[in-house]
Image: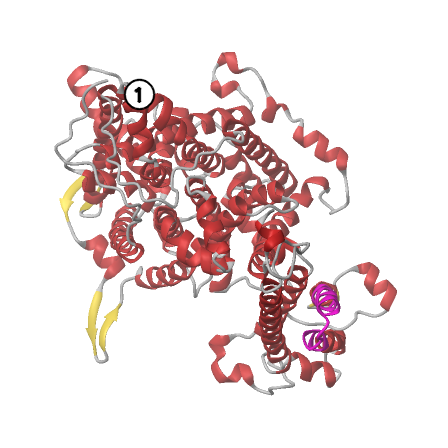
């Protein structure tokens, strides 16, 4: 007789005893009560947003004058404007809020959840519909004006009240879906999926679709698929005369070839740096780590300028080779070799930051088991360690490949006659012969290449399991590298590190001489012009021309970095730990903004967010949003690579003990994600400080970024000031990176560090 049949009260359909059923019922009642309380709190926030907060966008720089006439003036609340008739089209929102209020007070769970779904969905739909239909000059669409008659009412973009109400309706919709059983009824997971998907739709798909739609339009804005077919089949894109040299290939094949080379090169270099940092007794790991991340904290055109000053026809190295060995001066740096070197310098740090956490996560016990079975160190590395690194290698290659496709700064400086898609798109947007449709067609080609790389990554990884971090502590000792692997890493990483040091030594010197390449007289004029500080009546006065842009850049980067890490890592958690319809499409959507060149992103943001309902141009908010969703894929891929090594049983054990998903994420998963958190925070902060292509269209007089200031100095021929400013940025970002590392801390896996005396020997 089974234990269940002997339990008091007899067997139950759920396998619960008579004493256990009331406990389960009480648990469900408490859970339902908690959900009701949360739903009520969201409704309260929704009423505050609609009844008290300003509905439309305010110019906060105007101070108290911007609130004049509250609550019925330009700063009026949605409820006051709707009831007074000044914004009568907002009245349906009042009805839907009343429906949501009735729903959260309903004791019937089935009816309550159904009403929440309807109230939330209709609220989001009604709010967005009125926002898009009514613009600055009346009805936004001709067919609406013809149907309604007259120019119609007008309104400006959403403000705090409208944005908060839109979020509240979305949360109510998600809570209703969770109550109906979506994602096992976990409200946190459903709300997370809903919010992340909505943000990607709004700040990635919506702006990109506005410019990509022009690929199917003629110059008058009419639908013209024949023009799309003619532009995408252009021989300059798909020409195959590659046997005559890369310059004769179509621009698409040039871009693809360069992307593959950069992806392979950055992955190899990043792996070499990561293995030296984690598996060797190398004494100068700190210096090596700094040299490995220096390129990422430098504006890309500065690296290109340094390469020209070294290897151009008048470069220092070219001059020495000509004088000592009689080698003729040439322009070899312009073209594929120069772009490849510059992109390897710029994007290797991304691969390193992704791979170092993955290498640390490999369980030493698995390697010890292999050696217990008498496998050599080389066999263990080849058959155990390397296969476990596959998620990191795949994600590092994908990021390097996509970064190469989207980069336009290095090809612009060093491209010569070697054309790539990003520069072609740039000149199609801002060149003398502006052709927005051609830029959109070329962007579609870039997206196709990104999708191809994403698919190849999924095929290579397959459905294998790469878990190495479980719930049990692992006190194993990391094995030293085989001799041949250690020497390969040293011979790969150390020369590259020395080359990187030479590049940055040149950049550092350039700020202290009058004219790099011509006059090497020492001077402080460049730093004084940009960062002069004087003593005035009210104290210190930052009178240098670069201070305003530096302060604005630090402000934007400080807001963008934590938001990028939070959204990116939450997305990675959803991708690796949850299963829902459209998961793969959702994953590809997170990479979309990364594949589009920054130039196209900047133009698309202007087209999408310069008119109601989202008027954000000229504000710091649009810069923050652009950085968050431009850099989010690094957080996603880094988080996915790290989570692939963490056993799901850790999450399941926490959930079995009664913890909710948010508690599990906070106390179990997040401490193990510290390498990914560090990589995302560092990368997003640095890219916000050094990005050029997207923000050059989005900056304003009040919010001028550091990189646009440097570009202005380069265009004016003031190379000394530009290099001096770059040196200051490097110093600021190094301090910031060290601060982020101290704040995040290190992940503890219960493992011992490799002893310093271990020598990579044997094979």
Query: Viewed as shown, does residue 763 lie left or right of 652?
Result: left
Which corner quadrant of the image does residue 485 belong to?
A: top left
Asked if residue 303 lies in the magenta stretch, the reply is: no
Asked if residue 102 lies in the magenta stretch, the reply is: yes
Which corner quadrant of the image does residue 25 belong to?
A: bottom right
- At 67% from the left and 60% from the top, the residue drawn is 177
Residue 304 visible in the shown view: no
- From the image, tell me which residue sits under label 1: 373
The colouring scheme, among rainbow, by chain, secondary structure or one colour, is secondary structure
- At 77% from the left and 60% from the top, the residue drawn is 141
Image vertical order of residue 149 relative to residue 494, above or below: below
- At 62% from the left and 58% from the top, the residue drawn is 185
Which corner quadrant of the image does residue 320 belong to?
A: top left
Image vertical order of residue 541 relative to residue 326, above or below: below
> Dot 1 surroundings within 10 Å: few (below 14), some, or many (20 or more)?
few
Q: Which residues are magenta?
A: 100-121
Query: Viewed as shown, does residue 565 lie left or right of 585?
Result: left
Residue 754 in picture, x, y percent from top left: 20, 36
Residue 183 in picture, x, y percent from top left: 62, 53
Which residue occupies the extreme top position in the image?
A: 243
Principal SS element in the magenta part?
helix
Residue 551 in picture, x, y percent from top left: 34, 63
Task: Please tell me which residue lies in front, 350 or 550.
Answer: 350
Task: Please tell me which residue lies in front, 528 or 202.
Answer: 202
Residue 190 in picture, x, y percent from top left: 60, 57
Task: Please tell me which residue lies in front, 507 or 747.
Answer: 747
User: Which image quarter is the C terminus in?
Assistant: top left
**SS state under label 1:** loop
Query: Viewed as shown, does residue 150 lie left or right of 293?
Result: right
Residue 671 visible in the shown view: yes
């Amino acid at each position: 007789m089974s234990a269940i049949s002997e339990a008091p009260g007899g067997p139950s359909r759920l396998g619960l005893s008579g004493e256990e059923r009331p406990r389960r019922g009480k648990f469900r009642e408490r859970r339902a009560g908690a959900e009701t309380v949360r739903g009520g709190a969201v409704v309260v926030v929704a009423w505050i947003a609609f009844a008290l907060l300003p509905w439309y966008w305010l110019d906060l720089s105007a101070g108290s004058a911007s609130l004049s006439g509250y609550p019925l003036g330009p700063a009026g609340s949605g409820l006051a404007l709707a009831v007074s008739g000044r914004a009568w089209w907002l009245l349906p929102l009042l009805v839907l809020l009343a429906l949501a209020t009735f729903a959260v007070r309903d004791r019937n769970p089935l009816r309550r959840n159904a009403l929440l779904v309807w109230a939330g969905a209709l609220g989001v739909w009604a709010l967005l519909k009125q926002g898009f239909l009514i613009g600055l000059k009346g009805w936004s669409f001709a067919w609406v004006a013809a149907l309604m008659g007259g120019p119609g009412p007008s309104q400006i973009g959403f403000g705090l009240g409208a944005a908060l109400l839109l979020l509240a309706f979305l949360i109510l919709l998600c809570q209703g879906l969770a109550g109906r059983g979506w994602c096992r009824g976990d409200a946190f997971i459903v709300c997370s999926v809903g919010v992340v998907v909505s943000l990607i739709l709004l700040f990635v798909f919506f702006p990109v679709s506005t410019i990509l739609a022009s690929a199917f339009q003629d110059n008058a804005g009419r639908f013209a698929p024949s023009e799309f077919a003619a532009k995408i089949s252009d021989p300059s894109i798909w020409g195959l005369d590659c046997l005559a040299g890369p310059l004769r290939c179509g621009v698409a094949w040039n871009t693809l070839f360069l992307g593959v080379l950069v992806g392979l090169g950055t992955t190899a270099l990043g792996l070499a740096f990561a293995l030296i940092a984690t598996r060797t007794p190398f004494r100068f790991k700190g210096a090596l780590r700094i040299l490995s991340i220096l390129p990422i904290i430098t504006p890309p055109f500065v690296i290109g300028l340094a390469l020209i000053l070294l290897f151009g026809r008048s470069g220092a190295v070219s001059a020495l080779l000509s004088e000592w060995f009689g080698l003729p001066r040439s322009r070899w740096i312009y073209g594929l070799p120069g772009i490849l070197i510059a992109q390897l310098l710029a994007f290797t740090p991304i691969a390193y930051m992704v791979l170092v956490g993955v290498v640390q996560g490999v369980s030493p016990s698995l390697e010890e088991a292999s050696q217990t079975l008498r496998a050599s160190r080389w066999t263990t590395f080849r058959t155990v360690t390397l296969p476990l690194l596959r998620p990191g290698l795949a994600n590092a290659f994908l990021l390097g490949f996509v970064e190469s496709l989207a980069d336009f700064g290095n090809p612009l400086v060093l491209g010569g006659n070697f054309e790539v898609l990003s520069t072609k798109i740039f000149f199609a947007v801002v060149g003398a012969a502006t052709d927005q449709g051609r830029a959109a067609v070329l962007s579609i080609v870039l997206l196709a290449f990104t999708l191809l790389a994403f698919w190849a990554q999924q095929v290579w990884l397959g459905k294998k399991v790469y878990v190495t971090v479980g719930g049990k502590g692992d006190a194993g000792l990391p094995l030293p590298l085989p001799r041949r692997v250690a020497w390969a890493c040293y011979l790969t990483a150390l020369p590259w590190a020395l080359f990187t040091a030479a590049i940055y030594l040149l950049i550092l010197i350039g700020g202290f001489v009058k004219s790099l390449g011509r006059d090497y007289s020492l001077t402080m004029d460049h730093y004084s012009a940009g960062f002069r500080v004087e003593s005035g009546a009210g104290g210190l006065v930052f009178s240098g021309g670069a201070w305003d842009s530096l302060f604005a850049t630090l402000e934007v980067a400080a807001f963008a970095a934590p938001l990028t890490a939070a959204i990116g890592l939450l997305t990675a958690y959803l991708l690796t730990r949850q299963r829902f319809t459209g998961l793969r499409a959702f994953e590809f959507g997170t990479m979309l903004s990364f594949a589009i060149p920054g130039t196209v992103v900047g133009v698309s943001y202007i087209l999408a967010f310069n008119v109601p309902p989202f008027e954000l141009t000229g504000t710091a908010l649009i810069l923050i949003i652009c950085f968050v969703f431009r850099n989010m894929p690094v957080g996603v891929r880094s988080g996915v690579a790290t989570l692939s090594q963490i056993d799901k049983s850790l999450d399941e054990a926490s959930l079995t003990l009664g913890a909710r998903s948010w508690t599990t994420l906070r106390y179990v998963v997040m401490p193990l994600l510290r390498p990914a958190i560090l990589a995302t925070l560092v990368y997003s902060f640095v890219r916000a400080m050094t990005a050029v292509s997207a923000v050059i269209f989005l900056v304003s007089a009040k919010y001028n970024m550091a990189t646009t200031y440097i570009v202005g100095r380069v265009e004016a021929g003031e190379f000394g000031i530009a290099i001096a400013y770059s040196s200051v940025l490097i110093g600021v970002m190094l301090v910031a990176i060290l601060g982020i590392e101290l704040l995040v801390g290190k992940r503890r896996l219960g493992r011992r560090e490799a002893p310093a005396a271990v020598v990579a020997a044997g094979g």
